[in-house]
Image (cartoon, grey):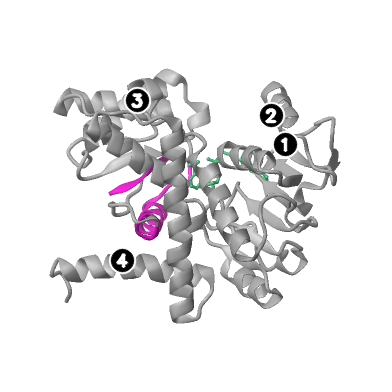
Amino acid sequence: MKGGIRYHPEVDLDEVNALAQLMTWKTAVADIPYGGAKGGIGCVPKELSLSELERLTRVFTQKIHDLIGINTDVPAPDMGTNAQTMAWILDEYSKFHGYSPAVVTGKPIDLGGSLGRDAATGRGALFATEALLNEHGKSIAGQRFVIQGFGNVGSWAAKLIHEQGGKVVAVSDITGAIKNEKGIDIESLFKHVKETRGVKGFHDAHPIDANSILVEDCDVLIPAALGGVINKDNANEIKAKYIIEAANHPTDPDADEILSKKGVTILPDIYANSGGVTVSYFEWVQNIQGFMWDEKKVNDELKTYMTRGFKDVKEMCKTHNCDLRMGAFTLGVNRVARATVLRGWEA
Ligand SMILES: NC(=O)c1ccc[n+]([C@@H]2O[C@H](COP(=O)([O-])OP(=O)(O)OC[C@H]3O[C@@H](n4cnc5c(N)ncnc54)[C@H](O)[C@@H]3O)[C@@H](O)[C@H]2O)c1
């Protein structure tokens, strides 16, 4: 099984269950050999010192070391956890079971992490966007993009889109939102964010109302921050023709219906942001092989998986005459159902 470990004050059993289920369908759509899992600790990680975080993680690992394992459950980072957390889990687990780098993914490179993992979700979203646009006779170059969130996923997506000739016209993060209709210079924005810890105040763009970012004029909208941000209050105002769900469940069911009537095409999260878990799978494979792939191989394999995933989802849409979200869920559920029947588990 595969899924992230979340440190967040609102984590509870229901949320972890729902996220684990989502991982089941996501790994099935990506066609990687895992079921879904998730874990969490209710805490405020920002209020804990590094040494408190380490002790919390080590004690947690002492409690779950018999539940996780390279062939049973392979955790990864999620909200509030990172490569360092995975390093502590690996170290604590190894005290009980011997050195086992494949027990977690999203590790530091020096401990067996994969090259390309950091960029993987953003790069996967780029490949997913490319596949969708190509199908509509378009390419990244020449399209205007708006991106909500400039963290791991949003900033990598922006950088790669910019490199491919796409025009990123507006970006937001927790500090504010900025716009430049001629296209934001993403490299300069990276420098600004490194220095100031946010997009606010970037010299080569003007500030806009952070609440308007999702309804700015563009061809492609990429929500890459929070869940539930596209809802009945703003769906009617959305101008994008395509929405790429890089965040987890950014669109609520009411908005889905409104956008579908408006003819907006939505690439669903369980496919669009599966680049991260796919490269996590590559990391696990490399650890088991005891062989490190170069970054080009990681990126090429990711492209193969994302392109094939799009084809598989489209095939489902054709067979069942449904939209991409229903196509992706049908694909995931069908794959799990088929494996269940083949193993003789059907009722
Ligand atoms: N990192 C991954 O590999 C991965 C994989 C799959 C899905 N996701 C999903 O992608 C989304 C982003 O994850 P991430 O890893 O980039 O997180 P992150 O913490 O690195 O970045 C989050 C970004 O969102 C911004 N943000 C927070 N509140 C905001 C607000 N109210 N308005 C605008 N921006 C706001 C933050 O400032 C930050 O730039 C989440 O929904 C996550 O579940 C991430």
User: How many numbered marks have been drawn onto this rendered protein structure?
Assistant: 4
* CB at disc 1 and ligand 1 closer than 8 Å: yes
Where, by quadrant of the figure, is residue 55 drawn?
A: top left
Q: Quadrant of ligand 1?
A: top right
What's the CA distance linking mark 2 and mark 3?
Answer: 27 Å
Instruction: Tell me, yes or no, whether the two marked residues, 3 and 4, touch with CB atoms within 8 Å.
Output: no
Question: Residue 135, image x and y in percent?
Answer: 59, 64
Q: Residue furthest front?
A: 137
CA neighbours of label 2 inside 10 A, class few (<14), some (14 to 19), many (20+): some
Q: Which mark is residue 190?
A: 2
Question: Residue 195, image x and y in percent?
Answer: 70, 21
At x 66%, y 55%, the residue is 139
SS under mark 4:
helix
Q: Residue furthest left?
A: 344
Question: Residue 202, image x and y in percent?
Answer: 80, 31
> Which is nearer the N-term, disc 3 or disc 1?
3
Task: Give the magenta-colored segment's residue range.
Answer: 1-29
Question: Residue 130, image x and y in percent?
Answer: 59, 54
The answer to if 8 sits in the magenta stretch is: yes
Mark yes or no: residue 261 visible.
yes
Mark 1 sits on what residue?
Answer: 175
What's the CA distance linking mark 3 and mark 4?
Answer: 33 Å
Mark 4 sits on what residue?
Answer: 335
What's the CA distance linking mark 1 and mark 2?
Answer: 14 Å
Nearest the eye: 161 or 277: 161
At x 40%, y 29%, the residue is 294
> Which is nearer the N-term, disc 2 or disc 3?
3
CA neighbours of label 1 inside 10 A, class few (<14), some (14 to 19), many (20+): few
